[in-house]
Image (cartoon, rainbow, N blue to C red):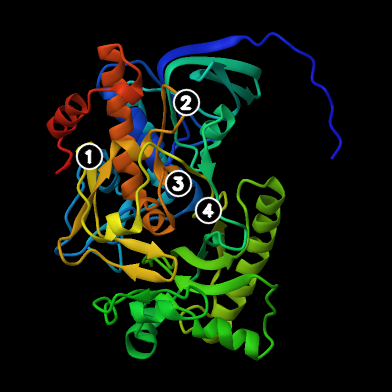
Amino acid sequence: MKHIKEDARTIPVMAETEVLVVGSGPGGLTAAVAAAREGVDTLLLERYGCFGGVLSQVGVEGVAWYRHEKTVESNGIGNEFEVRAKELGGSSKEPQSDSEALDAEMFKVVADKMVLEAGVRPLLHAMAVDVIMDGNIIKGIVIESKSGRQAILAKRVIDATGDADIAARAGAPYSKASKEELMMVTVMFACRGINRDVFQEYVSQTLKPSYADWAGESWGQRTSGKEENMFSPYIEDPFKRAVKEGLICLDEGIAIGGTWSTLSPEGDATQLNMVHLLKRDCTDVWDLTRSEIQGRDTVLKAIAALNKYVPGFEKARLRNFGMTLGTRESRKIVGRYSLTGHDVMNQARFDDTIGIFPEFIDGRGIIILPTTGRYFQVPFGCMVPQKIENLLVVGRAVSGDQTAHCAFRNMMCCTVTGQGAGTAAAVSLKNGVYVSNVNIADVQKLLIKRGVKIL
């Protein structure tokens, strides 16, 4: 690879803040709101034109689609997502759980309102491209936008990029599976022109889907047994038939089959989670490019199969793609503590707990739903990167093994780490200590006051 040498230049400081949150998915949005509600100056940076991440940008509507009768709730700001969306008429009943499916477009407004009401300073259309360091202490970031190259200085930085971009640039150690082992990526889509009544009759009378179907070729996930006969809106056979009969041809490393979410009275079908691409590294811009293009092409093939083989979808046509690729896994930091599969499947308890998450494991060949009241505590240490001060990482990039990742990557668990990090950042500022040295008892006391379940 050729290289060029970039000349040194002076970069204007466009903002200074106490807490800077980079990335506004469920983890980052929650972190920013939590910090601002504790009275510290907070700036939320987002590279796209809306907040919400996988909810508003990818189009995954079920923030708590795992919820059932005996599920223990995490509580906190994440639960407000559903409440606020419902108040605005931006939600509907999620089909396979006791939760709400959040309309991706309306959630953009929900996120705007939560950010502004909390007093967070919003900054859209700006991308973090470098970090500002003083030894091993992060002091801010460099951004690029239509306004040019600028700097933001911050006393605390929360990396909510999903890919640990800030931590990696700061020199924090991280792990990443090989391309062959990384979880699949998805181009989400929605259709219009559905005959809902005809399709629902097909589902109930012919398809009769359950979680047992997740063991098919597309997802390859087996249940723990107790989920086997529970309803799940999963469909795969029509796509296999389309390939077998020559209607469509799939490129190597691409699979079709999966779930849907809302079926509106107007004939829209949303959160069609059906097109999956394997062996893609979402920290590689070439892989991202190839995945977006191949994914969109494959969506059209999926719709062709639905048109021909699925009653109610005969006249269906594309409504929209997700505005960006859905990524399940990339970098994970090496933290003060690394959460393990044993932890998440054996109700682990920690002295530095900042929240809980039910026993919900989704990925790596297994699906376990939280139907028995079991849950694990989320430790502060999994968000604290080694070697770098005043930086926390939230969301799917926290420290853990592959099985634990299949729990903490889920959106509501991202809100747990987000609220914990935002609160810890605020407490550390008020106490005048590095965030890694924050008095965890003070953080826990404040989280409990805010309604978070931590024990």
**What is the three-letter code of the residue carrying label 3?**
Ser
Disc 3 versus disc 1: distance between alpha carbons? 29 Å
Disc 1 versus disc 2: distance between alpha carbons? 21 Å
Q: Look at the image and tell me whether residue 408 can be seen.
A: yes
Q: Residue at x 65, y 57 (%)?
A: 291
x, y percent for residue 237: 50, 85
Q: In this figure, which residue is indicated by the disc labeled 4?
A: 327
**Mark whose residue sits in front, 4 or 3:** 4
Q: Earlier in the sequence, mark 4 or mark 3?
A: 3
- Using the image, determine if residue 275 lies above or below residue 210: above
* Disc assigned to residue 400: none
Q: Earlier in the sequence, mark 2 or mark 4?
A: 4
Disc 2 versus disc 4: distance between alpha carbons? 26 Å
Q: In this figure, which residue is indicated by the disc labeled 3?
A: 56
Label 3 close to label 2 by CB (< 8 Å): no
In terms of secondary structure, where does tag 1 sit? strand
Q: Residue at x 18, y 24 (%)?
A: 442
Q: Between residue 96 and residue 150, name the one nearer to us.
A: 150
* Disc assigned to residue 353: 1
x, y percent for residue 229: 27, 82
Q: Earlier in the sequence, mark 1 or mark 4?
A: 4
**What is the three-letter code of the residue carrying label 2?**
Ile
- Using the image, determine if residue 13 lies above or below residue 61: above
**What is the three-letter code of the residue carrying label 4?**
Thr
x, y percent for residue 282: 60, 50
Q: Between residue 199 and residue 367, name the one nearer to us.
A: 367
